[in-house]
Image (cartoon, grey):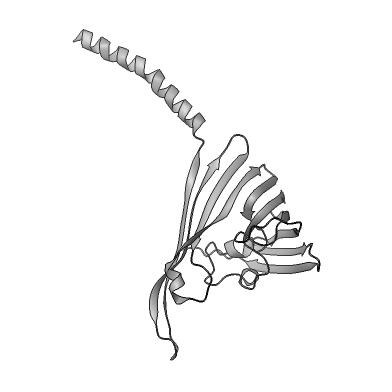
Amino acid sequence: MSKIKSFLLFLVLFTSPGIMAQDTVSKRMFPEGEPILRVFTNFHAGLSGDDTRSAFELDRAYLGYRMALSGNFEAKVLLDVGSPDDLSEFSRIRRYAYFKNAGLSYNKSWLTIDFGLIDMQHFKLQEQFWGHRYIEKSFADRYKFGPSADLGMDFILNFSSRLKIDFTVSNGEGYTNLQRDDILKLGLGVQSELLKGLFIRLYSDMMTHQVPESAGAAFLGRRVQLDAQ
């Protein structure tokens, strides 16, 4: 019995360093990350006399992965899988995949720098304000005042918990039209929490085209937290 106990003790002491070393090596070779899966589906029913159809719909899905690299760097890849925007009713059964995000981020306490195919800051506050997606797209997105993602670079300065300024340089055509030319869009936004839960954002951009194009936006919203009884 004593020999068996000695053998088991030797086996534990011999294998434990190897297990710890293997765990350390695996963490070093495979940085921490998290998968991204988001599906947008709905059920709708027509209430008017002309359209009383009802059906389930699958509009789009986001599939990707976010990985924390060494230091303050982070990489993100996100696929947008949805239906093409054409006039055919049968096109909705097809699915096309685009890169929605494919970029690198640097995050510090007061500074964030994003580079690559990244989210634009134009109407990001509006989309995230309620904590859930709008039933309809935001006004700027619906009427093509700016894309939700694009190739470019942005600088986000967090001066305090209530004041943020962002500056963006991008292609200006969106993530479904990634062209290479000498036309760039410059955007500047200021976001502030005036009072607790009261947010304001001002944004303006300019596109260096033969005929310069510019757009501006303002948003004011109030978050109210209801105490659950």
How many numbered marks are there?
Answer: 0
Tell me residue 84's x, y (percent): 51, 68
In the figure, 64 relative to 194: above or below?
above
Q: In which quarter of the image is the C terminus?
A: bottom left
Looking at the image, is 180 positioned above or below residue 91?
A: above
In the figure, 55 relative to 24: above or below?
Answer: below
What is the quadrant of the N terminus in the image?
A: top left
| Residue that appears at 49% across and 64% down | 82
- Residue 85: horizontal and vertical position, in percent? 53, 70
Residue 40 vs residue 84, the one in the foreground: 84
Residue at 41% from the left image edge and 18% from the top image edge? 17
The answer to whether one can see residue 57 in this image is yes
User: Looking at this view, is 135 or 179 the one in front?
Assistant: 179
Question: Along the horizontal axis of the image, is 51 left or right of 183?
Answer: left
- In the figure, residue 55 lies in which quadrant? bottom left
Compared to residue 169, the image places residue 130 above or below, namely: below
Residue 169, percent across and down? 73, 54
Quadrant assignment, res 144: bottom right
Q: Residue at x 61, y 72 (%)?
A: 142
Residue that protrudes farthest toward the bottom in the picture: 49
User: Is residue 229 in sight in this rendering?
Assistant: no
- Name the outermost residue toward the left: 1
Q: In this view, does 191 lie to the left or right of 36?
A: right
